[in-house]
Image (spheres, rainbow, N blue to C red):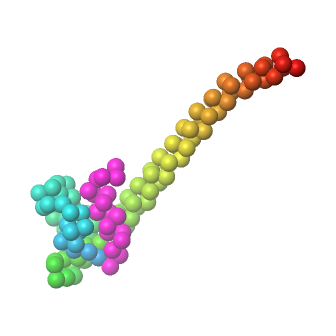
Amino acid sequence: MCNSIFIKALYFGQAKPNGFTKSELEEHLGKKECEWGPLQNEFEQRSTSAFNQSGHKKNEGELFWLTKSGYMLLAELDDVRQARKEAKKAHWIAIVAIFASVIVPFLIKLFETKS
C-alpha cells in the first residue's frame, strides 16, 4: 500500500495546498512518464475524483490540487494504517495472554506442591 504511486501523489497534493504542477509531481516521484500508468490517466482527465485542475497557469503548466474526495481518501488511508498498527499490537497482546494462561496454572501447581 505504501508504494502505490497514487497514494504518494495524494500525500504530495496534501503537502501542496496552494496547488502543484504535473512537473513538480514528476520531480517529487522520480518516475518516468511511461511509468505513471493509471496516475497519468487521472491527470489527463479534466476533473477526477481526487485531483482537480485549477485553470490557473504556472511556468511549468496548469495547477492541480486535491479535491474533497482526495482528502477523504487520505483520511481513510490514515485510518487503515492506524488500524493495522492496533491489530499488530492486539496480536502480540493475545499471544502473551495465551502464553500466560498456559504457564500460570503450571506455576501455581509448582508452588502448591513445594509448600
Tell me if 98 is positioned left or right of 29 in this view.
Answer: right
Q: Who is closer to the viewer here, 83 or 107? A: 107
Q: Quadrant of the C terminus?
A: top right
Q: Residue at x 63, y 29 (%)?
A: 98
Q: Can residue 82 be seen in this view?
A: yes
Q: Residue at x 39, y 60 (%)?
A: 74
Question: Across the whole image, how many numbered discs are drawn on residues?
Answer: 0
Q: Residue 53, image x and y in percent?
A: 23, 73
Q: Is residue 41 visible?
A: no
Q: Is residue 9 above or below residue 109?
A: below
Tell me if 107 is positioned left or right of 77 in this view.
Answer: right
Q: Who is closer to the viewer here, 92 or 6? A: 92
Q: Main secondary structure of the magenta part?
A: helix
Q: Who is closer to the viewer here, 49 or 114? A: 114
Asked which quadrant contains residue 71, the reply is bottom left
Q: Residue at x 21, y 58 (%)?
A: 39
Q: Residue 19, image x and y in percent?
A: 29, 76
Q: In this view, does 57 lie above or below 99?
A: below
Asked which quadrant contains residue 114, the reply is top right
Tell me if 104 is positioned left or right of 74 in this view.
Answer: right
Q: Residue at x 31, y 67 (%)?
A: 12
Identify the residue at the far front of this view.
114
Asked which quadrant contains residue 107, the reply is top right
- Specify start and end residues of the magenta stretch as a single range: 1-18
Q: Residue 30, image x and y in percent?
A: 21, 63
- Magenta run includes residue 46: no
Identify the residue at the far top of this view.
113
Q: Who is closer to the viewer here, 114 or 26? A: 114
Q: In this view, does 55 lie above or below 32?
A: below
